[in-house]
């Protein structure tokens, strides 16, 4: 009896550990680009045909575009928030069907939430566009100028609170200190969860309102995943190159996720900026003065969503693009390292990188690499970067072929491409000595 009990306990412990590993293993997939709204027949319908291939990348979550009526076709100038049928991406029914398809593949869906600012439907007596319609027959989200920040003088009547974050010139800044605003936006977010099927949020322009304001909406809606866009393009030297120390940049990200708490994470713009500079012959940048990774992932890896490009930085906008010939080095880094990696739609479906990306995602899954995995940086010099993750995986970036004795004899190469290679620990021992790849 004792022997069987011990065996059963061992099995239960193993299952619990496996469950924890699975729960921690997260890969986000951005399911659109800047021009997706132009798709004939609707983006939601089109994307349903790609759910299977997105699932093959190991994605656990998919980030979908802003779902509401918007003055701009991409969705980032929202107006009638309950009006999903006015979206350029498709109808409310199309969206629900798409979410259902993803859920069938155990992929959770994030809505792109744009609540810093809002576009009005009508003018007030001053002739200013500041009268908002919610998109329902009742008065939900039907607001006036009182709901605009008082220091947004182009639109405000001066009766709102001052803005808690950065200003946004193109549309009225919403007063998130207003109790009605908090209540009605929370109700709308919960409707997106309950009625439409969303599981979490990507918060657009999260610099526009303070972390305590974001915390209100996170606490009121209990999303399973939250990631904020807090875009900072690094500090630069006089020569135009990024400064060696980017602590102020990543401190802003760290302050936000700590201030919001719970499931809150942030896109690691610091890692993106440093990495895309590093792969251009300056891989020494990938180790900070304390021997850690240089972005938020070096401080709070469980809260860092790492990425190579998105609809703003890449796509057709190209506001801060990763070097196009080195994109796979970027994926070799984020898919084998701590943090929560985000895969961009374009790289899988438009650039033909699906096979290479999927191999790296499989390596991540097979070895149980998770947001809090242990990172040991073995070498970071101009033309080579080598790191070991959890004692099971080694990643090399850069053109240098000879990595000396850094690769133990019981590791074998499982992925390689343009200036990157990944090894995995195995029981098959190869002859010891210097390794060239």
Image (cartoon, rainbow, N blue to C red):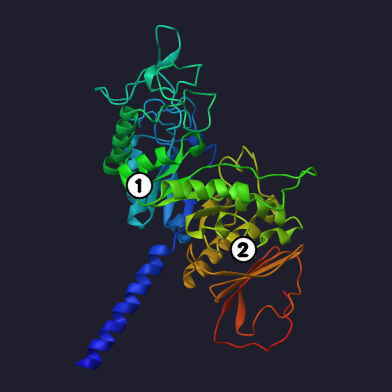
Q: Are marks 1 and 2 in contact (CB under 8 Å)?
A: no
Q: Which mark is residue 99?
A: 1
- The residue that mark 2 highlights is 292
Residue ID at (72%, 86%): 433
Q: Secondary structure at mark 2?
A: loop
Left or right of 239 in this view: 115? left
Q: Which residue occupies the foreground of this view, 141 or 60?
A: 141
Residue 120 pos. (x, y %):
42, 20
Q: Secondary structure at mark 1?
A: helix
Work out whether residue 49 can be spotted. Answer: no
Left or right of 435 in this view: 422? left
Category of crowding for the residue at label 1, using alpha-carbon neighbours closer than 10 angstroms: few (below 14), some (14–19), many (at least 20): many
- Distance from disc 1 to disc 2, alpha carbons, whole Å, reads 38 Å
Which corner quadrant of the image does residue 202 belong to?
A: top left
Work out whether residue 126 can be spotted. Answer: yes
Residue 254 pos. (x, y %):
52, 50
Which corner quadrant of the image does residue 64 belong to?
A: top left
Left or right of 166 in this view: 49? left
Residue ID at (53%, 48%): 253
Q: Quadrant of the N terminus?
A: bottom left
Sequence-earlier tag: 1 or 2: 1
Residue 172 pos. (x, y %):
47, 23
Which corner quadrant of the image does residue 314 belong to?
A: top right
Q: Nearer the viewer, mark 1 or mark 2?
A: 2
């Amino acid at each position: 009896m004792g022997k069987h009990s011990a065996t059963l306990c061992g099995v239960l412990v193993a299952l619990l550990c496996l469950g924890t590993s699975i729960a921690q293993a997260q890969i986000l997939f951005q399911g659109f680009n800047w021009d997706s709204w132009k798709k004939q027949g609707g983006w939601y319908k089109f994307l349903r045909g790609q759910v299977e291939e997105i699932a093959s990348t190991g994605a656990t979550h998919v980030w979908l575009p802003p779902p509401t009526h918007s003055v701009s076709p991409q969705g980032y100038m929202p107006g009638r928030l309950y009006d999903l049928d006015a979206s350029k991406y498709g109808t409310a029914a199309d969206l629900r069907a798409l979410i259902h398809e993803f859920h069938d593949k155990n992929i959770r869906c994030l809505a792109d939430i744009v609540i810093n600012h809002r576009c009005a439907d009508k003018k007030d007596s001053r002739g200013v566009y500041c009268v908002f319609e919610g998109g329902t027959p009742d008065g939900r989200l039907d607001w006036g100028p009182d709901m605009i920040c008082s220091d947004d003088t182009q639109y405000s009547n001066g009766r709102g609170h001052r803005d808690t974050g950065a200003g946004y010139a193109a549309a009225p800044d919403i007063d998130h200190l207003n109790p009605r605003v908090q209540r009605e936006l929370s109700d709308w977010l919960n409707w997106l969860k309950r009625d439409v099927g969303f599981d979490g949020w990507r918060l657009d322009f999260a610099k526009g309102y303070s972390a305590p304001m974001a915390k209100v909406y996170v606490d009121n809606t209990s999303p399973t995943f939250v990631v904020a866009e807090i875009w900072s393009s690094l500090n630069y030297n006089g020569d135009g190159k990024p400064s060696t120390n980017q602590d102020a940049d990543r401190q802003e990200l760290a302050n936000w996720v700590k201030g919001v708490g719970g499931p809150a994470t942030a896109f690691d713009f610091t890692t993106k900026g440093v990495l895309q500079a590093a792969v251009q012959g300056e891989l020494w940048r990938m180790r900070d003065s304390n021997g850690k990774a240089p972005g938020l992932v070096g401080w709070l890896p469980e809260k860092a969503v790492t990425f190579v490009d998105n609809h703003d930085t890449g796509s057709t906008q190209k506001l801060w693009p990763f070097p196009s010939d080195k994109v796979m080095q970027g994926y070799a880094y984020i898919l084998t390292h701590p943090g929560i990696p985000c895969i961009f739609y374009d790289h899988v479906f438009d650039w033909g990188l699906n096979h290479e990306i999927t191999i790296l995602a499989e390596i991540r899954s097979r070895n149980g690499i998770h947001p809090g995995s242990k990172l040991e940086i073995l070498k970071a010099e101009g033309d080579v970067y080598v790191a070991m993750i959890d004692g099971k995986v080694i990643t090399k970036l850069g053109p240098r072929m000879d990595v000396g004795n850094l690769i133990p004899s019981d590791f074998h190469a499982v992925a390689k491409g343009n200036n990157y290679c990944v090894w995995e620990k195995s029981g098959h021992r190869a002859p010891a000595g210097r390794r060239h790849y």
